[in-house]
Image (spheres, grey):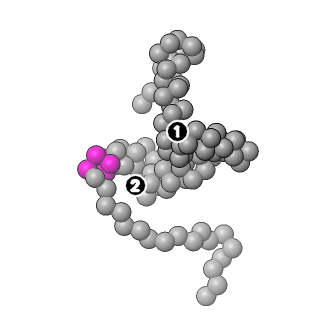
Amino acid sequence: MPKSMGEVKTFPQTIPFRLEQATWLREEAKHIGSVNEAVRRCVEDARSMYNLPGIQVSKLDADARARGMDRREYMKHLLALRYEAIIKGEVEKVPGKGQR
């Protein structure tokens, strides 16, 4: 039977998680709706660099390569820079925003 045009192809995958990872996934699942969707979001965020436009991803990937970093290292680098800016008071603080 032919598949409908709107059908999304998937493949089943079993991945063992460490306890701390499984605990985090369960907490995310409470907010998102399922562990599967939480994992899919993590994969999609890593794949698309948080759904940024392609031109931005290209520039950021080029910057990461120039620094000799893979994407994961580069994201940690960017977050560390942001943290430093916050600690130094170089960015506007937004009270109560983004807290869970």
Residue stretch rendered in magenta on the structure: 19-23
Q: Position of residue 39 (x, y in %)?
A: 44, 54
Sort mark 2 into few (<14), some (14-19) or many (20+) by Cα contacts within 10 Å. some
Q: Earlier in the sequence, mark 1 or mark 2?
A: 2
Residue 53 in sight: no
Judge by depth and name the residue closer to the eye, 74 or 13.
74
The image quadrant that residue 31 belongs to is top left
Q: Residue at x 48, y 23 (%)?
A: 83
Q: Pointer 1: what residue?
A: 75
75 is higher (above) or lower (below) than 2:
above
Which quadrant of the figure contains the N terminus?
Answer: bottom right
Q: Residue at x 52, y 39 (%)?
A: 75
Q: Given the image, on which type of amino acid does mark 2 rest?
A: Val
42 is higher (above) or lower (below) than 5:
above
Q: Position of residue 60 (x, y in %)?
A: 64, 40
Residue 21 lies within the magenta run? yes
Q: Secondary structure at mark 2?
A: helix
Q: Given the image, on which type of amino acid does mark 1 rest?
A: Met
Judge by depth and name the residue closer to the eye, 63 or 92.
63
Instruction: Report the residue that reaches farthest toward the top.
Output: 89
Sort mark 1 into few (<14), some (14-19) or many (20+) by Cα contacts within 10 Å. some
Q: Is residue 27 left or right of residue 42?
A: left
Judge by depth and name the residue closer to the eye, 33 or 24.
24
Which quadrant of the figure contains the C terminus?
Answer: top left
Q: Nearer the viewer, mark 1 or mark 2?
A: 1
Q: Residue at x 57, y 16 (%)?
A: 91
Q: How many marks?
A: 2
Q: Which mark is residue 51?
A: none
Q: Pointer 2: what residue?
A: 35
Q: Position of residue 3 (x, y in %)?
A: 63, 80
